[in-house]
Image (cartoon, coloured by chain):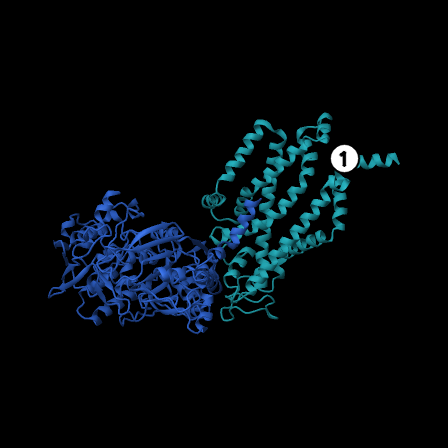
Chain colours: A cyan, B blue
């Protein structure tokens, strides 16, 4: 009996079962699983869009014009007679790519920055966090516009630029988490065992701080998608005939009285993604929260 | 986190929030009571200096603030007294004597004198001023030579003050449309003392046009200027005809997004909109007692081609691009039939003048021309960008045209949009490959469209240069004795222009506005000209709910 318990503890400390464990817990959470499958489905559709899309994304039919959903056009057509389903599929590629890439960039910078500042503390922390404050004070739009002006319009750069302004909050959350965690006994234990700071941060602090980070990440993705729409509307992001969900929604909103389907379907796609992300985020937080589940 | 959620919120809701009802009384109800017109003006103006600006939003403000020697009557478009009470032509119609209003005053109470006009015209024509509209005064003797630096003595200009209230203007040729030019802001008088207080006469964008500094001679004076929010003007008590002015003030809203402008109108925040969203037109047309007012408008919507940059330096490419645009399909569907296709720069029927139509929608010919130019089936086509100023209608036209070029010529043209002031800068510096452009007649005469394309003309912006064309427009047309002869010269010049196709005409403008039923004295006219002096507000029996 005793040996079995010891075995499982040692396994936990190797860090592999954190994920196995979490996966087991996540699978019990139906909403989270639904979210996961929706995201997987949307991502697969986005990847396969060039083969799946019923029409060419820029094929116009001016004589047809805007028509409500029909057998030929499931989601209807826009004012240029373009198939809306196709537009949403192609728009999803951009929106999901922007959402995931920019968030990944923000996550990478923010978590590293916050963890270092929080763990090292003292003067390093002060300098690093003041830098974050300064960047916070800069109007983010001007920053992105500057990047766009200097480097020209480029989709990848847009992803990076958005990520580069979105990491600030992430860094703050991470720093706060790490600061409270490093006071706890298990970190002191790790220090007294002689683990290097890098290992402690990577092995003990980051996984324990994952809960809030994941929740925040799931909020960042939709906000980044909207930010992209905003930038595109100003002429800094995606340009026609390329499109994104954010753009489709902002165009659709202009004509929602005349052609409501132009707003409803892209809106539904974005909302569904947003819900899926939130369900998944909630589920992941519960699944990964070692302390909460232990008691 | 709250900051971030609010940002997210702003992106989506900002526009509708703008339009949302403020608690209590609507702008329209309040305005009808207080005599304040709430006027949608399209864009934030570039400035308020009549010798600097070029756009339509600016002209609405400047017409409210200043007054030229004559002013168009909004019903007949005939010139009527402005700063000048009357005028006389000499026998040969080359000398005009203007007698200024004896009661003419600037908004600070100083008299408006003939010297003010002499000084202002010298300023407008000074090469250092960089006035893009300088050529509007070229009919004046020696004006062109002075503006192009061939002579430097301002005394040589054909404008002089005989006394405080008498201005004598000498023209090179009898110019039939000259009185109309006196209603254009490049010929307006500007306040010398104020301008010199804040810089040199020819300094652009100094502090003199700011609230509190600016002095004007029109029916209204500047009261408040909140960047990108509103510009408020109030009645000018010193205006010579102040008794006619019924409004106590006008609030100009620079609402670039015409969709939110339309929403503002619907919730009674505006009396008048600068434009109407295309998709709303069928709905408004169907309404009974619709506030929708559309009228032919003396203007052409076109694309500028930068003939100094490859591949648009090749006339075959320019012709191919033009022939590949299906203008009929575009105007019928995207524009809901509210505009006619344009085949040349001059709107048809300007004073009876008919421009030539040298081409039509011809995909086969277009492909052939592109092949000859070295791009068979679009192969080897470089990156070309079509630039337009941010607007939902311009975007729609651009998206449709972009696809027509792709379908017909198999070439990719990318789109980019710029904010109005940036766009104007890019266009005037020719920092573009293809740019959307519209030209609205400043006066009713084909010359107003054709003299843009003289070599190095301030609004040429394409690099087009043809000495024969210059000769026809600048020398031969003004000397023509009859209208038929003059129009024949214009036709010849326009044929030369459209053979070279430095611009792609797309459609002829129609003015489209939503006008609240309480507004009177805003008749639709060919120039879309507004004289705010005649506007009155008469609240209906049930104010505040004029439009559903």
The answer, for residue B206, to whether it is visible in the render is: no
Q: Could you tell me which chain the residue with mark 1 belongs to?
A: A
- In this rendering, the answer to whether A64 lies above or below B6 is below
Q: Residues within 10 Å of mark 1 (few under 14, many from 20)?
A: few
Instruction: Spot the residue most to the right.
Output: A1
The answer, for residue A67, to whether it is visible in the render is: yes
Horizontal relation, residue A61 to residue A205: left or right: left
Horizontal relation, residue B154 to residue B18: left or right: left
* Residue at point 72%, 52% (across, down): A33
Where, quadrant-wise, is the C terminus of chain A in this rendering? top right
Where, quadrant-wise, is the N terminus of chain A in this rendering? top right
Horizontal relation, residue A138 to residue A68: left or right: left
| Count of numbered badges drawn on the protein | 1
Nearer to me, B515 or A140: B515
Coordinates of residue A149 in the picture (x, y in percent): 45, 45
Tag 1 secondary structure: helix
Coordinates of residue A162 in the picture (x, y in percent): 54, 45
- In this rendering, the answer to whether B404 lies above or below B206 is below
Horizontal relation, residue A264 to residue B374: left or right: right
Coordinates of residue B400 in the picture (x, y in percent): 46, 63
Coordinates of residue A190 in the picture (x, y in percent): 72, 29
Q: Return the residue at label 1.
A: A13
Nearer to me, B25 or B137: B25
């Amino acid at each position: 009996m005793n040996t079995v318990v010891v075995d499982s503890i040692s396994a936990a400390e190797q860090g592999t079962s954190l994920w196995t464990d979490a996966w087991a817990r996540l699978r019990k959470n139906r909403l989270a699983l639904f979210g996961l499958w929706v995201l997987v489905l949307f991502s697969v559709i986005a990847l396969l869009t060039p083969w799946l899309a019923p029409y060419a994304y820029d094929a116009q039919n001016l004589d047809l014009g805007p028509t409500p959903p029909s057998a030929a056009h499931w989601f209807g057509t826009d004012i240029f007679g373009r198939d809306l389903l196709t537009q949403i599929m192609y728009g999803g590629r951009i929106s999901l790519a922007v959402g995931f890439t920019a968030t990944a960039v923000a996550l990478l910078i923010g978590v590293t920055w916050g963890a270092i500042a929080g763990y090292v503390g003292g003067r390093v922390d002060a300098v690093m966090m003041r830098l974050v404050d300064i960047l916070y004070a800069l109007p983010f739009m001007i920053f992105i516009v500057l990047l766009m002006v200097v480097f020209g319009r480029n989709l990848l750069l847009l992803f990076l630029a958005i990520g580069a302004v979105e990491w600030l909050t992430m860094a703050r959350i991470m720093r706060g988490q790490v600061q409270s965690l490093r006071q706890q006994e298990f970190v002191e234990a790790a220090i007294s065992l002689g683990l290097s700071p890098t290992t402690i941060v990577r092995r003990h602090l980051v996984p324990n701080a994952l809960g809030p980070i994941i929740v925040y990440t799931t909020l960042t993705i939709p906000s980044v998608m909207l930010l992209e729409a905003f930038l595109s509307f100003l002429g800094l992001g995606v340009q026609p005939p390329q499109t994104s969900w954010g753009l489709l929604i902002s165009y659709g909103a202009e004509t929602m009285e005349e052609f409501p389907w132009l707003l409803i379907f892209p809106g539904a796609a974005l909302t569904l993604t947003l819900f899926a992300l939130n369900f998944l985020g909630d589920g992941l937080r519960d699944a990964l929260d070692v302390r909460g589940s232990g008691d | 986190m709250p900051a971030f959620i609010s940002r997210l919120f702003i992106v989506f809701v900002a526009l509708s929030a703008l339009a949302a009802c403020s608690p209590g009384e609507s702008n329209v109800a309040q305005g009808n009571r207080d005599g304040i017109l709430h006027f949608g003006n399209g864009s934030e103006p570039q400035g308020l200096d009549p010798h600097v600006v070029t756009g339509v939003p600016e002209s609405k403000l400047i017409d409210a603030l200043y007054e030229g020697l004559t002013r168009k009557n909004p019903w007949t478009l005939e010139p009527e007294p402005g700063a000048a009470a009357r005028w006389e032509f000499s026998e040969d119609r080359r000398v005009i004597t203007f007698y200024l209003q004896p009661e003419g005053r600037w908004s600070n109470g100083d008299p408006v004198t003939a010297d003010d006009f002499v000084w202002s015209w010298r300023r407008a024509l000074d090469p250092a001023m960089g006035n893009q509209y300088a050529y509007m005064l070229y009919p004046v003797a020696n004006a062109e030579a002075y503006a192009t630096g061939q002579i430097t003595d301002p005394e040589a200009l054909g404008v002089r003050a005989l006394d405080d209230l008498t201005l004598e203007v000498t023209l090179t040729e009898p110019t039939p449309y000259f009185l109309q030019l006196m209603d254009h802001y490049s010929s307006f008088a500007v306040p010398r003392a104020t301008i010199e207080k804040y810089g040199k006469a020819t300094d652009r964008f100094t502090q003199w046009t700011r609230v509190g500094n600016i002095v004007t001679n029109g029916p209204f004076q500047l009261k408040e200027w909140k960047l990108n929010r509103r510009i408020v003007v109030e009645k000018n008590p010193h205006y010579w005809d102040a008794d006619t002015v019924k409004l106590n003030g006008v609030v100009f809203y620079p609402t670039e997004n015409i969709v939110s402008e339309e929403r503002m109108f619907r919730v009674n925040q505006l009396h008048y909109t600068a434009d109407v969203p295309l998709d709303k037109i069928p709905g408004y047309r169907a309404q009974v007692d619709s506030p929708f007012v559309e009228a032919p408008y003396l203007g052409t919507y076109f694309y500028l081609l930068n003939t100094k940059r490859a591949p648009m330096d090749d006339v075959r490419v320019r012709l191919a691009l033009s022939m590949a645009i299906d203008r009929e399909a575009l105007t019928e569907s995207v524009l809901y039939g509210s505009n006619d296709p344009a085949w040349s720069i001059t709107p048809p029927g300007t004073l009876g003048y008919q421009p030539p139509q040298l081409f039509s929608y011809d995909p086969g010919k277009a492909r052939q021309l592109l092949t000859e130019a070295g791009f068979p089936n679009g192969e080897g086509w470089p990156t070309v960008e079509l630039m337009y100023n941010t607007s939902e209608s311009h975007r729609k036209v651009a998206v449709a045209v972009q696809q027509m070029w792709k379908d017909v010529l198999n070439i990719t043209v990318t789109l980019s949009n710029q904010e109005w002031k940036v766009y104007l800068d890019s266009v005037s510096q020719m920092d573009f490959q293809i740019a959307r452009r519209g030209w609205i007649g400043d006066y009713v005469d084909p010359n107003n469209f054709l003299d843009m394309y003289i070599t190095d003309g301030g609004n040429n912006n394409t690099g087009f240069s043809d000495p024969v064309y210059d000769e026809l427009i600048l020398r031969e047309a003004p000397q023509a004795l009859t209208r038929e002869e003059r129009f024949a010269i214009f036709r010849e010049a326009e044929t030369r222009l459209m053979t070279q196709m430095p611009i792609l005409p797309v459609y002829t403008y129609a003015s489209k506005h939503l006008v609240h039923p309480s507004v009177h004295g805003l008749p639709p006219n060919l120039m879309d000209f507004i004289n705010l002096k005649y506007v009155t507000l008469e609240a209906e029996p049930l104010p505040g709910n004029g439009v559903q």
